[in-house]
Amino acid sequence: MEKQQYIDRAEEAFYKVYNRFPVVFDHGEGVCLYDTDGQEYLDFGAGIAVMGLGYSCGELKAAMKGQVDRLCHTSNLFYNVPSIEAGEKLLKVSGMEKVFFTNSGAEAIEGLLKIAKRYAFDKGMAPDYEIIAMKHSFHGRTLGALSVTGNDHYQEPFAPLVPGVRFALFNDLDSVKAVWSGKTCAVIMETIQGEGGIYPATEEFLAGVRALCDEHEALLLLDEIQCGMGRSGHMFAWQGYGVKPDAMSVAKALGNGVPIGAFLAWGKAASAIVPGDHGTTYGGNPFVCAAAAKVLDIFERKNIVGHVQDVGDYLWKRLEEVAARYGCVQAHRGKGLIQGLEFTGPVAPLVSHALQKERLILISAGSNIIRFVPPLVIEKEDVDEMVKRLGAAIEATHIPGPQ
């Protein structure tokens, strides 16, 4: 069947909520994807920071195939071995005490919000307790996650949302203090803002918010869905700051393509949820947890975090060269293998040209920022090839320089 026939079938069947590129991918290998025409694409998007171990990882495939032959689902009315193993491994690398497996990152955020509300309820706070979130954040598409996503574009069509959310400016501690009230029960934020433009938290800001939460007995909730699982050069980005949250969310690279997320907590947040407060049909089933357990095994044995630190430094150096070479690049931010280049104009034409002409997969973060979130197993030669293709795409799309 021709590519266009597949696209036409999809457009007929699916809700039009994505503006997809005219490519139909068929399979992947390593850090590359291949379309139905057999063309190879170098992937620096990793399925939006999901495919940490790249494509067609033999060990992971074997673990999933083996679990399919044993058991895929039983419900959470019973125990299963893969979920126990995955849970213990995730708690070990995070330093948390309790874990709940979900089907996605957005569901993990919902869990964090319920922890905060239950915590406030148990403290006897007024029923109109509040959560502070950050402007320009992104936490997901469900109504609860949208309520703490600081972007009017995502929120407006679905108002009214969950009440009791106040927004502060990321990396501005005074703005957090300005919206803090006697009703504040928690602060939620990404350790590194992704969709908002690849902005890492400053050490002073994260430590300051932690101190505020401690002073007022509120919870610090960190969203590690995109920046976690080794991407920052630490297993979880907050570990690079030495500031531990009360609870956190994780997803994306945890399953390397298998839909799984989790929320984790310790201390007073770990005891906030009691029987009957939360549940899910598919979350933590044997199949997805067998995948997550194997992903965590591979991360440890192959020292993926150390590899990210090494290659991330090299990516930083090469993107600095790109920023110096092209006047249309006005900023470079990030850590490890979550970095971004900010351009002087819209990057949609650049992303499209890179994909179609240079066979390079890039994704944006806002209208004028390209984020680089490749598989964590990329090598320095992959970075060199990406820079070569990126340069060709920049030169071909003629983004205007600074005015």
Image (spheres, rainbow, N blue to C red):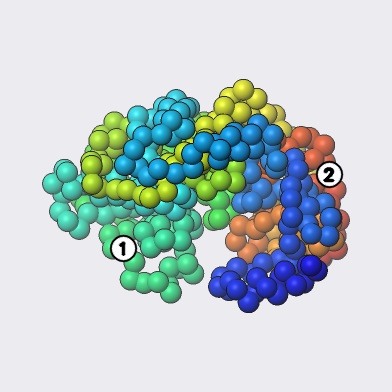
The secondary element bearing badge 1 is classed as loop
Question: In the rendered structure, which amino acid carries the disc numbered 1?
Answer: Val
Residue 201 or residue 151, whichever sits in front: 151
10 Å crowding of disc 1: few (<14), some (14-19), many (20+)? few
In the rendered image, the vertical position of residue 2 relative to residue 295, given as above or below: below
Residue 270 on image: x %, y %: 29, 35
Q: Amino acid at mark 2?
A: Glu
Question: Mark 2 = which residue?
Answer: 385
**Quarter of the image that includes the C terminus:** bottom right
Residue at the image position 43 percent from the left and 30 percent from the top: 81
* Residue ranking furthest to the top: 301
Mark number displayed over residue 162 = 1
What residue sits 78% from the left and 41% below the top? 383
Q: How many marks?
A: 2
Camera-side residue: 114 or 274? 274
In this picture, residue 341 sits left or right of residue 127: right
In space, the residues marked 1 and 2 are separated at their CA atoms by 46 Å
Percent position (x, y) of residue 85? 45, 28
Outermost residue, front side: 69
Q: Is residue 59 left or right of residue 361?
A: left
Q: Nearer the viewer, residue 334 or 85?
A: 85
The answer to whether any part of residue 218 appears in the image is no
